[in-house]
Image (cartoon, helix red, strand yellow):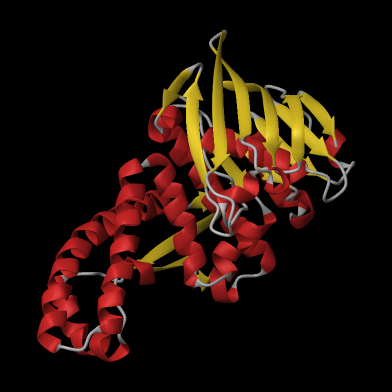
Amino acid sequence: MTLKKISLTNFRNFREKAVSFNPELTIIIGENAKGKTNLLEAVHFIVNGVGFRESKEVELLYFDSNEHATVEAEFEEEGAKKTFRTVLVKKNQDEAARVEKSFFVGRTKKRQFQYRQELLSAVLFTPQQIEILTGSPDKRREYFNKLISLYDYEYKKRLDNYEKALRRRNKVLEKYIDRKQVEKELTFWDDYLEGEASYVTTKRQEYLKFLNDNPKIDSKSFHIEYQKNEFSKKRIQEVREIELNARRTVIGPQKDEFQISLQGSRDKNVHRFGSRSEQRLTILWLKLCEVLYCTQNTGKEPILLFDDIFSELDVKNRKLIFALIKSHQTVLTTTEEEILPIAKVQKSIIRI
């Protein structure tokens, strides 16, 4: 399946925009703050159903536009053309504004997971992803949550259920006065959360096993350790007094941690001791595994999206990227004109 063209209405900084894509490589080039990343995000949005920068989806609409936004794309598969469209509508106008998304394949409205089943996926590479390694544990949890949710709708549902129930449980702990009453209320939430947490941690464990089964990149080998914070009846009883005193939940997958090591005669924790180059290579390993995981789970090669990453990479890592580009449809943004002759594949240039 190949992306042929995309049309935007009221999306990010574009009132109206239409572009066509090369089946191999499309380079979006221009100065910063001109909309290169917005165009790349539109591709990510039409394919994965979500943006990749907004804290609130209402930010995807044109400069707080009160109108709806539309992203429509044409794909080609085995000579047949197929149209996919996503519509965003702002539901209210105050600070709590949210959007409602509708998904269409041709003229037929679909649920999001049905819509995605008919599409390929998109794998995103950005300089900011280094925070998966250098940032706090919640950055790593966020990365794995978003990734697994793209391919497992049940995971997304269970994770949402868990997070909502966790907030309710914390409210019970925050406001409790009577010990017997709080124990009774917690029993209900404990039973519910244990089931949801079990699914979440099992799926995280499965993905980490996939990573450890594919440890190599460029003669280097990595290993990721899952430091699971289990939510179980046994652990609940062990920390009950701590939770009552702290008035919050102190165990569960919201506290899981993931640690990556570079394998060798002495393993090196890349979070703490890796050089900048080793940390970038680690991110490339994670993303290349993501490409492989996507292909194995969907049977379709994903489209690759690179957001101005080449200034961050040394020559060796650039070669790894260009080797990957040769086998996947790719869209990349850059401010560097010198990238153009290096990319020795069929390509189209979009200047913004």
Residue 72 image offset from top left, x and y in percent: 61, 26
Callout count? 0
Q: Nearer the viewer, residue 230 or 188?
A: 188
Position of the N terminus, as image quadrant, is top right
**Vertical placement of 310 versus 84: above or below?**
below
Residue 62 image offset from top left, x and y in percent: 71, 43
Q: For residue 190, which quarter of the picture?
A: bottom left
Residue 45 image offset from top left, x and y in percent: 58, 38
Does residue 334 show up?
yes
Residue located 53% across and 10% down the image: 78
Does residue 263 show up?
no
Q: For residue 152, which quarter of the picture?
A: top left
Q: Nearer the viewer, residue 286 or 232?
A: 232
Residue located 87% across and 45% down the image: 336
**Vertical placement of 195 versus 84: above or below?**
below
Looking at the image, residue 15 sits to the left or right of residue 146; the answer is right
Q: Nearer the viewer, residue 226 or 59?
A: 59
Position of the C terminus, as image quadrant, is top right
Residue located 75% across and 35% down the image: 15
Looking at the image, residue 33 sits to the left or right of residue 199; the answer is right
Looking at the image, residue 281 sits to the left or right of residue 249; the answer is right
**Vertical placement of 255 versus 117: above or below?**
below
